[in-house]
Image (tube, rainbow, N blue to C red):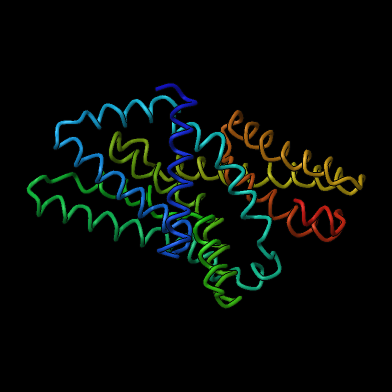
Amino acid sequence: MDSLSAAAALISLAALFSWLNHKYIRQPQSIALLLFSLALSLALVALGKLGFDAKQLGQQAIGAIELDRALLDSMLSFLLFAGALHVDLSEMARRKWAIGFLASLGVLVSALLAGSALWAIFSALGHPVPFIWCLLFGALISPTDPIAVLAILKRAKAEKTLESKMAGEALLNDGFGVVLFVLFLGIAVDGEKATFLHVGELFAREVLGGALLGLVLGWVCYRMLAAVDDYQVEILLTLALVMGGYALALSQHLSGPIAIVVAGVLIGNHGRKYAMTPASRARL
């Protein structure tokens, strides 16, 4: 299966799942896609038990489109920017302590709980896994997905206070999650690498460096947006900011997600208010 066929199959399945959800289940889109994906995975396992080579088909489909690279290098930057555009910076500033607590200690507690639960499950099943590797998994899954969080909150019509806290935490927790992941990975692979100095250098380079780059690129894009009044040009500028900014951050070993989130918040607040006409805001 070539990459085009694999992508076509995934898009077709997503469209079918979305239609079934809208018609019958009526769950938030992100939750419904997760449920249908789990059901599809179980169906492939069942086909394998019946003698069909479903495992090889799945491996070919995933290998053809290089799913990890497609998500991390292509789709993630657009999703983060789209989410950051709708974050109210003034609301985040008013609740900065709660957001900071959730995005740091909240991620740590979540990683510890998830890692401990996974360790207990594997031990109960008779396949013990070293605790540090379970913590590594906990650090990997603890940062929440901002796109899913924002979509669910908007559909649920949550209170503004709760929405601003959850949205801010979802957009900012990646930096702390990266630090935790590298810390646990260093302990698991080579304890000497897991020093406070190494973790501090990583945090400064990845998170603070990424935030500074996003601020600079967002300000440059804002100045260019303010100088024109053509929504087609403005949309092209924001596309260039997302794609070029993310690629630049990765090339400099900075956090691409943090850079794009900072740039998106700046454009979504300052740029939306001072550099765009109502027509441009609606189209963007």
Q: Position of residue 238 (x, y in %)?
A: 75, 43
Say if 110 sits above or below 246 in the image: below
Q: Position of residue 225 (x, y in %)?
A: 85, 46
Say if 163 sits above or below 145 in the image: below
Closest to the observer, 42 or 243: 42
Q: Quadrant of the N terminus?
A: top left
Q: Residue at x 65, y 73 (%)?
A: 94
Q: Is residue 36 left or right of residue 94?
A: left
Q: Quadrant of residue 163?
A: bottom right
Q: Quadrant of residue 31?
A: bottom left
Q: Is residue 77 left or right of residue 135?
A: right
Q: Is residue 148 left or right of residue 38?
A: right
Q: Residue at x 9, y 54 (%)?
A: 124
Q: Which residue is the extreme one toward the top?
A: 2
Q: Quadrant of residue 133?
A: top left
Q: Residue at x 20, y 31 (%)?
A: 52
Q: Position of residue 199 (x, y in %)?
A: 45, 43
Q: Position of residue 106 (x, y in %)?
A: 42, 63
Q: Which residue is the extreme one toward the front?
A: 23
Count numbered badges in the picture: 0
Q: Residue at x 75, y 52 (%)?
A: 267
Q: Which residue is the extreme one toward the left?
A: 126
Closest to the observer, 146 or 188: 146
